[in-house]
Amino acid sequence: DAGVTQSPTHLIKTRGQQVTLRCSPKSGHDTVSWYQQALGQGPQFIFQYYEEEERQRGNFPDRFSGHQFPNYSSELNVNALLLGDSALYLCASSSAGQASREAFFGQGTRLTVV
Amino acid sequence: AQKITQTQPGMFVQEKEAVTLDCTYDTSDPSYGLFWYKQPSSGEMIFLIYQGSYDQQNATEGRYSLNFQKARKSANLVISASQLGDSAMYFCAMREGPNTGNQFYFGTGTSLTVIP
């Protein structure tokens, strides 16, 4: 049973560029959440997708957008990259239909903006 | 105000000894869940243990136990018989409300080093 998979694992981008990160949730999960973890910090909630719609959003600017596909996989897009966007981006999956407690996280994508 | 506070940036423990990692939380919601995750250098967040706000007993999962003191709003993680593989970052997290899909609030983490 594959867990949460994220791609790519590492990425280097130039300031001002755009980036797309991808996430495949754990089998049977329909909800995907994205988190940004800056160096030395805990993860911060970006947004959550369920039924192909953004259901919740944290305190992040509109440069951060996302999408969920019918197979429940998700993309995180960041436009006009800033140096401060350098971080580990974590995807978490869960199931809205089960009384699951924990969310399952992927290994993350390490984004470096230069 | 911070939802989750972890005041120990780094901790050291001798192999086979027990260690306590501190966590305090802040919420006005009567229904919430408290979680501990382990994050090795690979980056993945590994679920360790969960405590619900209405749970009467402290949670235990193998060598992990959660010392839940509701009145003090603390949820400390106790790791017994530490192993070298326990060296990692540890994050306390909270999810408010009964909806299992709500967002997690994380603390800043504690770096645990197990000494042989």
Image (cartoon, rainbow, N blue to C red):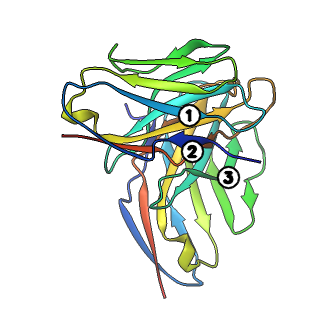
Do the dots labelled 1 and 2 sit on one chain?
A: yes
Quarter of the rendering containing residue B81: bottom right
Image height check: is B45 above or below A48? below
Instruction: Check residue A106 in the rendering and tell me which mark sits there, or answer none.
Output: 2
Q: Which chain carries label 1?
A: A
Image height check: is A68 above or below B87? above
Picture coordinates of residue B103, whole percent (x, y): 56, 28
Instruction: Check residue A23 in the rendering and tell me which mark sits there, or answer none.
Output: 1
Amino acid carrying mark 1 in the image: Cys
Amino acid carrying mark 3 in the image: Ile
Picture coordinates of residue B90, whole percent (x, y): 49, 57
Separation (CA) of disc 3 from disc 1: 24 Å
Mark 2 Cα-neighbour bin, 10 Å: few <14, some 14–19, many ≥20: many
Amino acid carrying mark 2 in the image: Gly
Secondary element at tag 3: strand
Picture coordinates of residue B51, whole percent (x, y): 69, 45
Separation (CA) of disc 1 from disc 2: 8 Å
Residue at 47 percent of width and 40 percent of height: B106
Q: Which chain carries label 3?
A: B
Picture coordinates of residue B93, whole percent (x, y): 54, 42
Q: Name the residue under label 3.
A: B49
Mark 3 Cα-neighbour bin, 10 Å: few <14, some 14–19, many ≥20: many
Q: In which quarter of the image is the N terminus of chain B?
A: top left
Q: Nearer the viewer, residue A10 or B37?
A: A10
Residue at 68 percent of width and 46 percent of height: A3
